[in-house]
Image (cartoon, rainbow, N blue to C red):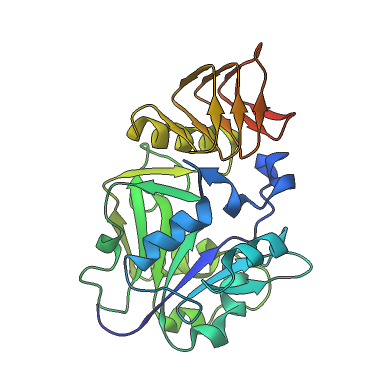
Amino acid sequence: MSGELAAVLLAAGRGTRLHPLTRLRPKALCPVGNVPLVDRALALVAGQGPAGPASVAVNASWLAEQLAEHLAGRAHVSIERPDPLGTAGGLARLREWIGGRAVLVGNADAYLSGGDLARLLAGWDGQAVRLLGVPGAPGEVGTFDGYRFAGFSLLPWRWVTDLPTGPGELVHAVWRPAEAAGGLQVVGFGGFFQDTGTPAGYLAANRHAAVAAGGRIVAPDARVDGWCEESVVGAGAVVQGRLTRSVVWPDGRVGPDEHLVDAVRAGPDVTVSVS
């Protein structure tokens, strides 16, 4: 691929499926393996070149001030008020900032491990719309050429120029039209992908990170007195009881008589369980 590339990370959604966790912080700041999801996404796009406010933008709406503070000096933040504009509308709002460049678009809540995002850009002619994908189940609704969308797409500038300025989604404004015109290419991602938008998905991503790290991830200043298996413990947290396939957010507390299984603990008393 030749030419300048911009990156846009989509982080404006309300994250309602992750309530009550996303009442405390926007989904993009929810940690996986003790790293906020948006920081993981920033690292992925930086590996392909874009870095800093001139090359990377993040859209925000719900609890936007938290995200803007977290990203200060590291990305251009586009705040959508009063409501989020969707994936297409959010990108259209950034048209002037994009300024003629091709765009690497990523969902900030996508967890990717292993594999190689560079495959999405390798050999690109600058004309086709590209999607990163993982194999879908036979007959699965919402697939593209047998693949499920894996969080990142690549758009030529000519598709950005035609995006509607109101609320809208890329699947309807770009991906399906490009597919119908024979201009969509799906690139397989060889690593692990997880949509973290639900409690089950969020826990699965954290479990993957913990297992990859040897079975658990514990922040240096956290205290774990009890059992901790395939779990993640955040900064300043105290675990006196037991954790199995669970996550304790920074400053969270797990009492000596508690055993969290497939659950997220935020603060002293907010718990989300996956049965």
As displayed, is residue 225 above or below residue 33? Answer: above
Image quarter of residue 158: bottom left
Image quarter of residue 178: bottom left
Residue extending furthest toward the right: 82
In this view, the residue in front, 84 or 4, is 4
User: Residue 66: percent from the left, percent from the top?
Assistant: 68, 60
Q: How many marks?
A: 0
User: Residue 274: percent from the left, percent from the top?
Assistant: 60, 25
User: Residue 194: percent from the left, percent from the top?
Assistant: 44, 42
As displayed, is residue 134 above or below residue 72? Answer: above
As displayed, is residue 118 above or below residue 196? Answer: below
Q: Classify the position of the C terminus by image quarter.
A: top right
Q: Is residue 210 left or right of residue 248?
A: left
User: Residue 30: percent from the left, percent from the top?
Assistant: 59, 47
Q: Is residue 89 left or right of residue 157?
A: right
Q: Is residue 127 left or right of residue 203?
A: left
Residue extending furthest toward the top: 257
User: In the image, what residue occupies the spot 32% across and 65% down?
Assistant: 47
Residue extending furthest toward the left: 123
In this view, the residue in front, 26 or 130, is 26
User: In the image, what residue occupies the spot 66% across and 41% down?
Assistant: 17
In this view, the residue in front, 187 or 97, is 97
In this view, the residue in front, 5 or 25, is 25
Q: Classify the position of the N terminus by image quarter.
A: bottom left
